[in-house]
Image (cartoon, rainbow, N blue to C red):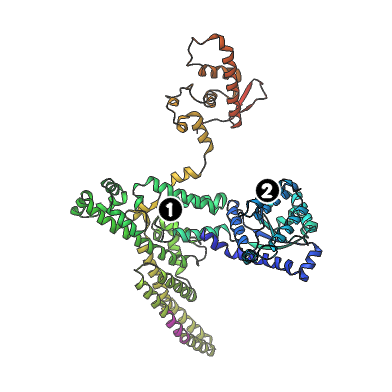
């Protein structure tokens, strides 16, 4: 939430400034406002938020809080589903504005507002009368109470109406509201905010010129959802501050859902929260997934069973196999020795994360400036590659090194300066020598720059000598000698230094960007079960329906519903019985035969000695239950009425799930 607020701060500041300008013009009755009043223009902010509609609610909630704290208490949030007509819109607007004015310290005022809201006829005139009464009451308040309210709001705060989903509003509703509001703009300081998901051109598509000319529109653009996501991954995942980490496959699932489904940052965060819940629920050793100091303390209080869980971890077993036999015996038998080693391994894992993030950022500085972005433009793409395998063994990394060896001097110097800043600000303690080495490279580049001027003077004198030799034979001879010298020429000092810089960055990558799954005890802090996450987030409704109807015990957990093989239990819900019977039929299902089979299953437990006197009543009940079950099955889309035969229905689903 803090990251979202920081990202939206500039946007909200601009909107607050816009509202202050609009309001101050109304307050001071300046010439500009008088002209606007005569032309009946309404100040309007067109807020383009992008197609990630699920994130808009949080943005508008935050915007409302900012406006209430700085500009005005009179804010109405309108949605298209609540405003099918202009009457509904005015009614919703009045309701929200009156609720804004309710004084929580005075129950009498609250009762009055609720009663008046029900009795007042909903119209723009009623809203204007209400606003004038509210301002009169505010002006007549005691000086102390008036001072506290005016410290946050202006003397005559504007009425802000936010259309959260402008594209969903019908054209007639918007036109009527704008035309009516423009006729009363000199009495009511109204400001509109249009929430737009597509393009600002939608305003002119929905509204004719005669209506849009009544709006004084200013455009505001929020950051794209991709920039939001990159910032969140950078602040939450690429940091050693938070011990919990996502594995490569899990992170890729969340990013793919974001890129190919909804562009929703909120849904990405919900998926991230789900990963946290699953990890701490399914991993017995997740108690150690906490800050390093707390983890060391918790290691000392581990039980014998928890120590055995550590010994079962695949990464720890690999670690044990690489030790000498005496140490292997101690690790597998002595709990105290195991706890001591576990503390050291957890500390190593923490140091690995600190170093990993710094070197990853340094590598991203180089790869993000290369043409065609072999390793991706965003740092999250590079992070996924490094988590998946040893990045230095990939073809993309090799091509990146080749391109880096062709960078010019100014680009190299800029990148080295950025890397120095990254390592200086890093929390890792192993980069002092790295910073010294990078600064040494920068010094050498500066020395080369001084030598370059001397070489430039020498090349100019050579060109002058060539110009003096007008004889064709001597000229050709000299050019051939220059060509041969270039072929056999060694690398220049700059080229050698450039190769040295790239090789040094390559050595850092090979040392610190080892995949996380090669580190001991990584299972404690990394969530890698992508299949579980995919099962939660990627809905499979047909499979779930088939499971529920074919095997209701899976969801209801009723022992009476357990069935062996393909048997149909008469204890199952009616829709389950009807569904199982319909699986045995062909393309067309005879309703009479289906009813008889249903009645046979339902009455199977009654036996042959059932009371014959009440058989007609039982048949009516069974018939009604059958009709309801078939209707539910039709509603779910498994069958439909058939035009070929009136007493048949057509089956719509085939094959296994």
Residue at x 46% of width, y 59% of height: 236
The correct choice, above or below, for 151 with respect to 641 in the image is below
Which residue ends up furthest to the left in the rendered image? 326
Along the viewing direction, whichever of 304 and 154 lies nearer the viewer: 154
- Main SS, magenta residues: helix
| Image coordinates for residue 411, horizontal then vertical, percent | 49, 73
Residue at x 39% of width, y 55% of height: 389
Instruction: Kindly state the secondary structure of the residue where label 2 is placed.
Output: helix
The correct choice, above or below, for 595 with respect to 50 in the image is above
Earlier residue among tags 2 and 1: 2
Instruction: Kindly state the secondary structure of the residue where label 1 is placed.
Output: helix
Rate crowding at label 1 as few (under 14), some (14 to 19) or many (20 or more) other CA atoms within 10 Å: many
Along the viewing direction, whichever of 21 and 571 lies nearer the viewer: 21
Image side of residue 315 versus residue 111, left or right = left
Measure the alpha-carbon separation of dots 2 and 1. 55 Å
| Image coordinates for residue 210, horizontal then vertical, percent | 80, 57
Along the viewing direction, whichever of 154 and 54 lies nearer the viewer: 154
Quarter of the view holding residue 199: bottom right
The magenta stretch is 444-454
| Image coordinates for residue 349, horizontal then vertical, percent | 34, 59
Along the viewing direction, whichever of 77 and 409 lies nearer the viewer: 77
> So how many labels did they put on this image?
2
The residue carrying mark 2 is: 114
Which residue ends up furthest to the bottom in the rendered image? 468
The residue carrying mark 1 is: 248
Image side of residue 575 versus residue 298, left or right = right
| Image coordinates for residue 232, horizontal then vertical, percent | 50, 59
């Amino acid at each position: 939430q803090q990251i979202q607020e920081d990202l939206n701060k500039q946007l909200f500041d601009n909107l607050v400034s816009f509202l202050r300008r609009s309001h101050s013009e109304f307050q001071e009755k300046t010439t500009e406002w008088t002209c606007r009043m005569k032309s009946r223009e309404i100040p309007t902010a067109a807020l383009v938020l992008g197609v990630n509609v699920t994130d808009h609610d949080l943005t508008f909630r935050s915007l409302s809080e900012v406006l209430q704290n700085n500009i005005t208490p009179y804010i109405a949030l309108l949605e298209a589903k609540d405003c099918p007509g202009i009457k509904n819109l005015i009614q919703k607007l009045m309701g929200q504005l009156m609720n804004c004015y309710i004084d929580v310290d005075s129950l009498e005022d609250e009762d009055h507002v609720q009663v008046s809201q029900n009795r007042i006829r909903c119209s723009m005139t009623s809203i204007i009368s209400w606003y004038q009464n509210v301002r009169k009451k505010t002006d007549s308040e005691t000086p102390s109470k008036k001072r506290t309210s005016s410290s946050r709001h202006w003397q005559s705060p504007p009425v802000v109406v936010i259309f959260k989903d402008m594209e969903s509003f019908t054209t007639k509703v918007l036109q009527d509201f704008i035309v009516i509001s423009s006729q009363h703009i000199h009495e009511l300081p109204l400001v509109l905010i249009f929430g737009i998901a597509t393009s600002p051109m939608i305003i002119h598509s929905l509204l004719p010129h005669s209506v849009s000319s009544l709006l004084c529109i200013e455009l505001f653009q929020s950051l794209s959802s991709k920039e939001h996501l990159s910032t969140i991954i950078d602040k939450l995942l690429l940091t050693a501050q938070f011990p919990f980490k996502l594995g490569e496959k899990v992170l890729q699932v969340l990013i793919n859902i974001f890129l190919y489904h909804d562009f929703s940052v909120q849904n990405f965060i919900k998926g991230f929260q789900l990963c946290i819940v699953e990890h701490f629920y399914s991993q017995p050793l997740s108690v150690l997934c906490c800050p390093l100091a707390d983890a060391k303390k918790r290691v000392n209080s581990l039980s014998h069973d928890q120590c055995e869980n550590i010994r079962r971890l695949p990464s720890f077993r690999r670690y044990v196999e690489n030790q000498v036999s005496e140490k292997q015996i101690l690790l597998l038998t002595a709990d105290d020795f195991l706890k001591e080693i576990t503390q050291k391994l957890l500390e190593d894992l923490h140091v690995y994360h600190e170093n990993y993030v710094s070197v990853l950022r340094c590598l991203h500085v180089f790869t993000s400036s290369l043409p065609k972005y072999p390793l991706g433009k965003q740092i999250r793409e590079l992070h996924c590659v490094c988590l998946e395998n040893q990045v230095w063994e990939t073809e993309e990394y090799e091509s990146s090194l080749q391109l880096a060896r062709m960078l010019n001097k100014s680009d190299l110097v800029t990148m080295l300066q950025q890397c120095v800043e990254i390592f200086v600000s890093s929390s890792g303690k192993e980069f002092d020598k790295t910073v010294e080495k990078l600064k040494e490279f920068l010094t050498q580049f500066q020395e080369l720059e001084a030598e370059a001027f001397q070489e430039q003077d020498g090349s100019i004198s050579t060109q002058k000598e060539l110009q003096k030799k007008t004889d064709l034979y001597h000229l050709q001879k000299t050019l051939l000698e220059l060509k041969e010298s270039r072929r056999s020429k060694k690398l220049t000092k700059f080229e050698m230094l450039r190769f040295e810089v790239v090789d040094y960055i390559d050595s850092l990558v090979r040392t610190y960007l080892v995949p996380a799954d090669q580190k001991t005890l990584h299972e404690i802090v990394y969530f890698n079960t992508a299949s579980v996450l995919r099962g939660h987030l990627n809905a499979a409704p047909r499979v779930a329906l088939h499971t529920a109807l074919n095997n209701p015990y899976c969801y209801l957990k009723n022992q009476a519903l357990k069935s062996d093989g393909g048997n149909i239990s008469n204890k199952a819900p009616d829709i389950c019985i009807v569904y199982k019977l319909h699986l045995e039929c062909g393309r067309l299902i005879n309703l009479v035969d289906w009813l008889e089979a249903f009645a046979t299953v339902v009455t199977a437990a009654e036996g042959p000695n059932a009371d014959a006197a009440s058989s007609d009543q039982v048949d009516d009940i069974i018939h009604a239950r059958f009709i309801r079950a078939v209707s539910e099955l039709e509603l779910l889309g498994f069958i439909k009425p058939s035009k070929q035969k009136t007493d048949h229905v057509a089956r719509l689903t085939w094959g296994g799930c």
